[in-house]
Amino acid sequence: MIAIERVTILVMDGFGVGETRDAAAYGDVGSDTFGNIARRMGGLALPNLARLGLGNAHAVEGVGAVLAPVASYGKMAEASAGKDTVTGHWEMAGLVVTKAFATFPGGFPAELVAAFEKAIGRRVLGNKVASGTVIIDELGDEHVRTGAPILYTSADSVFQIAAHEEVIPVAELYRMCEAARRLCDPYQIARIIARPFVGKPGRQGDAWKRTYNRKDFAMPPHGETVLTLARDAGLPVVGIGKIENIFAGRGIGESIHTEGNIDGIKQTVDVLKRGERGIVFTNLVDFDMLYGHRNDTPGYARALKEFDERLPEIVAALGPRDMLLITGDHGCDPTDVSTDHTREHVPLLCYAPGLKAGINLGTRASMTDMAATIAEALGLKAAAGTSFFKELECAR
């Protein structure tokens, strides 16, 4: 049995591969981020993902099954309640959320808003469910004029605060989010999200642009994860993108900020070239933030193509004792009538140069199976889930 020394996790944020059996309970019947994009675009060409076996896990127009995939493949359902970013990432790290985080379809309670306004010394605008780009278009001019931050939520458990970087400096916006985090804990709100933007008022529709100074302030995980197990064992854990924010820093030794998918891939390759052991955990946010939530199907398709084109750089940086896992945290179907996340399976691709390839890992009942596999591969204390590591044990 070959010893795995390093595991790299690539999360394609908001990349789903078909509705789960409980999709109806979430209003997501028919959701299929990958499949619906392919149908809408008249097919996709993703040769590197196809070579790994993505079409074997979920065939779509243009990306079908290949005879000898170089990775093992499957898909995972979510055992947790909910379909948000925190829930998905926590589950793949070994934690199931049994009670969904709170959502606020009618806006936040008056007492919470009043407490927040008192804490920051400003009144707020908005306080409703909205698309982030739409509400900035709606209230951006008033925000610039008054200095009042824009507060909004979505179908997910998020308390989002948008502010122009020249009206409320980013550091001050982060302090507002820290105050909100303390106030929102009793309400079981998963994430406070700073949503800074730039631009000039008065040009309706194209005045504003959100920046990559976005930052998430999540509730801390309620138990140990494969990340904390790795840290306890003295292994390096590097979070790339918003990983540190999602886990409230728990189990993360080094955090690297990114500005989109391409930068996230570059940072991942740079870390892999160091040759260290441990875990590298990368979130590629653009699929979800720029395209899924904006119902931008052509943009999502372009992002998939860009990722596919850069994937060989990551594979080339792997050593003989590396394991690469590619997955998603939930769906975010841009062809859906809403702009929200969708309750879908996520892909599971496992590439390890020294292990057996082409194994059909099936449909896993929980994303915790990834955590269990990572723990077994790295020789850590067992994590929650059912490991599939032994299925790959025949060295090539």
Image: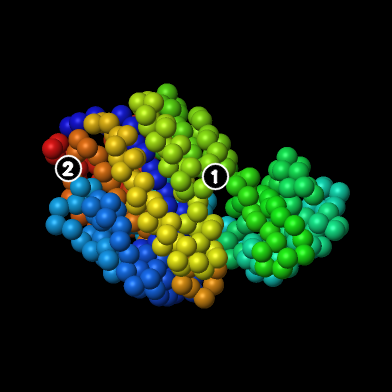
Type of the residue with mark 1: Glu
Residue located at (53% from left, 41% from top)? 258
> What is the count of numbered marks?
2
How far from the left and from the top, in percent, is residue 28? 46, 72
Type of the residue with mark 2: Lys
Per the image, label 1 sits on a secondary structure element best described as loop
Front in this rendered view, residue 112 or 235: 235
Quadrant into which the N terminus falls: top left
How far from the left and from the top, in percent, is residue 60? 29, 67
Cβ–Cβ under 8 Å for marks 1 and 2: no
Earlier-in-chain disc, 1 versus 2: 1
Q: Quick one: which residue is furthest to the top in this view?
A: 234
Find disc 1 in the rendering and name its residue: 259
Q: Is residue 139 above or below residue 120?
A: below
Residue located at (37% from left, 64% from top)? 34
Does any portion of residue 370 appear in the rendered image?
no
Q: Which-is-in-front pick, marks 1 and 2? A: 1
Residue located at (34% from left, 56% from top)? 347
Q: Quadrant of residue 161?
A: bottom right
Does any portion of residue 285 appear in the rendered image?
yes
Left or right side of 236 for 370: left
Front in this rendered view, residue 143 or 235: 143
Rounded to the nearest whole Å, what is the CA distance between mark 1 and mark 2?
Answer: 35 Å
How far from the left and from the top, in percent, is residue 69? 19, 52
How far from the left and from the top, in percent, is residue 323? 29, 38
Please tell me how crowded label 1 is: few (under 14), some (14-19), or many (20+) other residues with Cα within 10 Å. Answer: some
Find disc 2 in the rendering and name its residue: 356
